[in-house]
Amino acid sequence: MNIKEYKKRAELIRDNDIYRVYDLKELEDINLSLTELKANKETTGHTHEDLDEVYIFISGKGEMEKGKERKKVKKGDVMLIPRGNFHKVYNKSWKPLKFWSIFEKYEGRGR
């Protein structure tokens, strides 16, 4: 499925001045989420105590904070976020930074 088809099938769960977030809830246990982080914005950052998460960057450039580290990210980069690690994404450019996140569904997100 391409991005256009994904957006038709997914639910737009956030749309504000920071980002658009789409969740595809078709799978029973895993959520596939697309985030389009707007220019010069950053996510709020968060921690999952009970689940791991994978980020796959598909366009743009930025930075990702993971635990106490902060690394540059770009199209094609994959970041593994072990449970309990704080993580946050920064878009330092004038173009959107787009990425997939894949995580186990939990109460309040995907269920």
Image: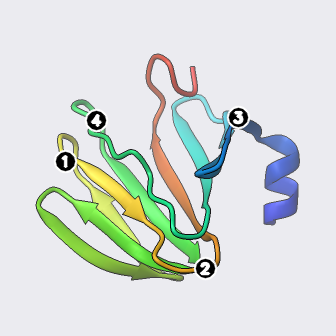
Q: Amino acid at mark 4?
A: His
Q: Which mark is residue 94?
A: 2
Kindly indicate the quadrant of the structure image that contains residue 31.
top right
Is 20 drawn above or below residue 61 in the view shown?
A: above
Q: Could you tell whether 82 is left or right of 4 in the image? A: left
Give the residue pinned by disc 4.
48
Q: Residue at x 17, y 40 (%)?
A: 84
Measured as percent of width and height from the top left, residue 107 is found at: 45, 17
Residue located at (26% from left, 39% from top):
47
Residue extending furthest left?
68
Q: Look at discs 4 and 3 and give the one toward the viewer.
A: 4
User: Separation of disc 2 and disc 1 at Cα?
Assistant: 28 Å
Classify mark 3: helix, strand or loop: loop
Name the residue type under label 3: Glu
Which percent across, then down, holds residue 66?
23, 60
The residue where tag 3 is placed is 26
Precedes in sequence: disc 2 or disc 4:
4
Q: Secondary structure at mark 1?
A: loop
Give the mark toward the camera: 2 or 1: 2
Where does residue 14 sit, x and y in percent of width and height? 66, 37
Q: Earlier in the sequence, mark 4 or mark 3?
A: 3
- Measured in 3D between alpha carbons, the distance from the residue under mark 2 to the one under mark 4, in whole angstroms, is 29 Å
Whole-angstrom CA distance, mark 4 to mark 3, is: 22 Å
* Amino acid residing under circle 2: Trp
Determine which residue is flagged by label 1.
Answer: 85
Disc 2 versus disc 4: nearer the observer: 2
Dot 3 alpha-carbon crowd within 10 angstroms: few under 14, some 14 to 19, many 20 or more: few
Q: Are marks 3 and 2 in contact (CB under 8 Å)?
A: no
Label 2, residues with CA under 10 Å away: few <14, some 14-19, many ≥20: few
Of residue 108 and residue 19, the one placed in the foreground of this image is 19
